[in-house]
Image (cartoon, grey):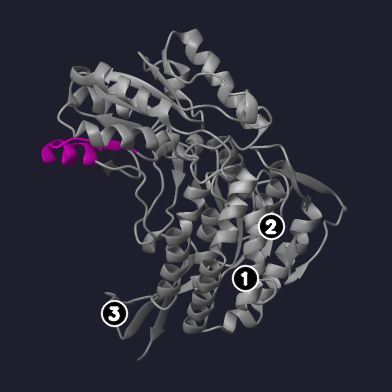
Amino acid sequence: MLIDGRWVAAASGKTFESRNPATGELLARVAEGDREDIDRAVAAARKAFNGPWSKWKPAERQLLLLKLADLVEQHIEELAALDTFDMGAPISRTRNNRQRAVGMLRYYAGMATSLHGETIENSLVGEIFSYTLKEPVGVVGAIIPWNGPLTATIWKIGPALATGCTVVLKPAEEAPLTSLRLGELCLEAGVPPGVVNVVPGFGETAGAALSSHPDVDKVAFTGSHVTGQKIVQASAGNLKRVSLELGGKSPDIVFADADLDAAVPGASMAVFANSGQICSAGTRLFVEKKVYEEFTDKVARFAKNLKVGNGVNPETQVGPLVSSEQLDRVTDYLSIGRQEGAKRLSGGERLTDGDYQKGYFVPPTVFADVRDDMRIAQEEIFGPVISAIPFTDIDEVIQRGNATTFGLGSGVWTRDVSKAHRLAKAIRAGSVWVNCYQAMDPAVPFGGYKMSGYGRESGKQHLEEYLNVKAVWIKTA
């Protein structure tokens, strides 16, 4: 683990295994952090925050981020391979993260010199000048999931460096290797000791210690809503700032007037990309009754033609699930779907023959004739499973699309601009994609409504999550 600019073992001496989910192969034994390691890392982060790091000018932080971006770009093949080996995503997908990963760092670099307060004309009697300062919140505890280690790590480290915060990052125990390699690149870029610390470990130990630590000023978390609730409770000790990007059960709505040839692959990969392990996946596929059977049959055929396999194969389109625990969760939902009476059009069972034997493979699965009250339509599965649901008209689908405790992503497929605008306003979700899905850009904010969390990542709103606003009053006469 990386603490105070040095690579150290866990205080307990414990390690845990990281294995390739496609083959079961042992990749590494990783230091297992717990409360004592978190204490060391937070102390280092506080020392750095109060020390020379606080004197760095915005332009200096900008140059540091630009150097880190260059290093990530130089090592993108290695970083992509680490993501593929450690969590199973197809190498074609992880290589395509280059633009996003490098773009985020360069965006944060640009924002580092754009942070400012404002002068405010007040209405008090006399000559009193008032203005605001934007100041870094302090020590940030960052906890990330395993479904996109490279970009998830940058999404936490980038804004911390841009704003002048320090950070203690706990990567997911299922896929810690990319975060550790990024820690090495931070040192190579010139990040001072203690500014970025990486402490791998388990959620119930290292994660819990970080989220409740009295000297952590903010927690930035991405993961399940259940863990998010625990983090909110743990943050109460010192009322630390919290931003949460949690799960979803996103509606993806296809109207009969849509370009169906474009909507089939678009709606399919809104779920099957990354083996469905995306929080904003469009897993509730609402299709207008006029084209319901035609469209769901096409989606099922598309699913059957996707190549499932080891992510290192450039031809693989759907890799394994990340772990045996995730495999059990997804296959349980496949059984639940059948028991609830959903009609399986494709997939539906674990793959175990030949090369699939040692990995955690589930094929792209389409369930039709799904009712809103079914568990597969209400609960986040986090696997390559579509629940296809028919609807009749726009008012109905707005009501049913919003009938969920989540509100992260959503999709609309139509040629009618009036429908597009109406749905964009009516859907209670942080993102609405029209005739596309999962489009992301560093300048555009991303986050959720309801149980999908609060706060935003990317965009200028992201930097605000890492800043305090101070009001200054000066009586001049």
The label nearer to you, 3 versus 2, is 2
Q: Report the magenta residues as a range.
A: 410-426
Secondary structure under the numbered disc 1 in the rendered image: helix
Quickly name the residue at label 1.
186
Considering only order in the chain, which callout, 2 or 3, is on the residue closer to the N terminus?
Answer: 3
Quickly name the residue at label 2.
214
Secondary structure under the numbered disc 3 in the rendered image: loop
Label 2: few (<14), some (14–19) or many (≥20) C-alpha neighbours in 10 Å: some
Is residue 176 among the parts visible in the rendering? yes
Query: Furthest-right residue in view?
Result: 13
Q: Quadrant of residue 268?
A: top left
What separation in Å lies between label 1 and label 3 (alpha carbons)? 51 Å
- The disc placed on residue 290 is none
Q: Residue at position x 59%, y 42% from top?
A: 88
Q: Is 204 included in the stretch rendered in magenta? A: no
Q: Could you tell whether 333 is left or right of 271 in the image? A: right
The residue closer to the viewer here, 95 or 8, is: 95
Give how far across and how far down residue 325 sits, in percent: 66, 30
Quickly name the residue at label 3.
125
The residue closer to the viewer here, 279 or 436, is: 436
